[in-house]
Amino acid sequence: MTLIALGQPKVTDTTNILDIEVPAQLEVNVPTGFAHIDALFAGDGVTPSTASIVTGIPGAGKTTLMLQLADAITRSGHIAVYNTGEESLYQVRKVVRRLGLEHGFVPMYETETKTLIRKIKAIQAKNKGKQVFLFVDSLQCMEVEREKGKRGRPASHGNMEVETTALLTQWAKESYGVLFLIGMVTKDGTFAGKQKIRHIVDVHLHLGVDTDRKSETYGNRVASMEKNRFGLAGVEYSYEINSLGVHFEMGV
């Protein structure tokens, strides 16, 4: 499954693009409370319905940054749901304490994609009027339950990752939710998944190291926007990571 309903307006062969009205939900970006993330995404926040994948080399701070972001989102008055398949919630709680996070988020540990979506929709129904952000840590831990009675070979792990991405993106588009999906890369920094995944999502945020010897930030850790349908791509910020979390350099 890779076909995604994007909420297309009805058009005819006489329609002009200028006649199309953008839904009100897409006209206002939502500040996360994390200035550098807001700047990387839409400039002043994240556009509702954004589906993003966050990648990074091992030890880059993907989970750390997403936990900090979820806490900032809660502080800003929105709903942040952090679904982990990588670690137990006890481990996540210990990291939250080490980072000194004070606002928290809604924790989950669901690995079946459709079940997770049902739970998120229930949270949205209870919190109408609030922006819901879903963090999935990580894509590699998710699976899609096979329909009962369906014949043929089970989907490969790679195809299951594609279907999970498509289903979660579909949720974001239909409900104007915001998705942060953590993905893996190989040791050399190459995305460890099917390229269809990068085509499905709106945004690709990568945490890596500046390898350009001509750059003033050569050797620094860099958060770079590789793809962005709602803002500028190619934007990047240097950052540091220690026991207290990810810290961006000045520039916002």
Image (cartoon, rainbow, N blue to C red):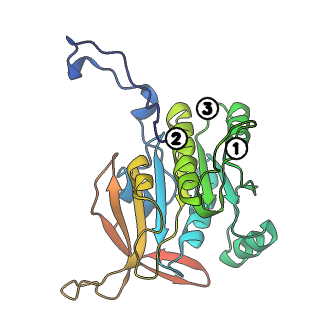
* C-alpha span from label 3 to label 1: 34 Å
Identify the mark at residue 146; answer none if there is no mark. Answer: 1
Residue 166 lies, in percent from the top left, at 51, 44
Helix, strand or loop under label 3: loop
Identify the mark at residue 129; answer none if there is no mark. Answer: 3
Q: Is residue 199 shown left or right of residue 150?
A: left
Residue kind at label 1, given as amino acid type: Arg
Q: Identify the residue position indicated by label 2 in the image.
A: 1
* C-alpha span from label 2 to label 3: 30 Å
Q: Is residue 216 shown left or right of residue 49?
A: left
Residue 2 lies, in percent from the top left, at 47, 41
Any part of residue 188 in sight? yes
Q: Quadrant of residue 242?
A: bottom right
- Label 2 near label 1: C-beta < 8 Å? no
Foreground mark, 3 or 1?
1
CA neighbours of label 1 inside 10 A, class few (<14), some (14 to 19), many (20+) = few
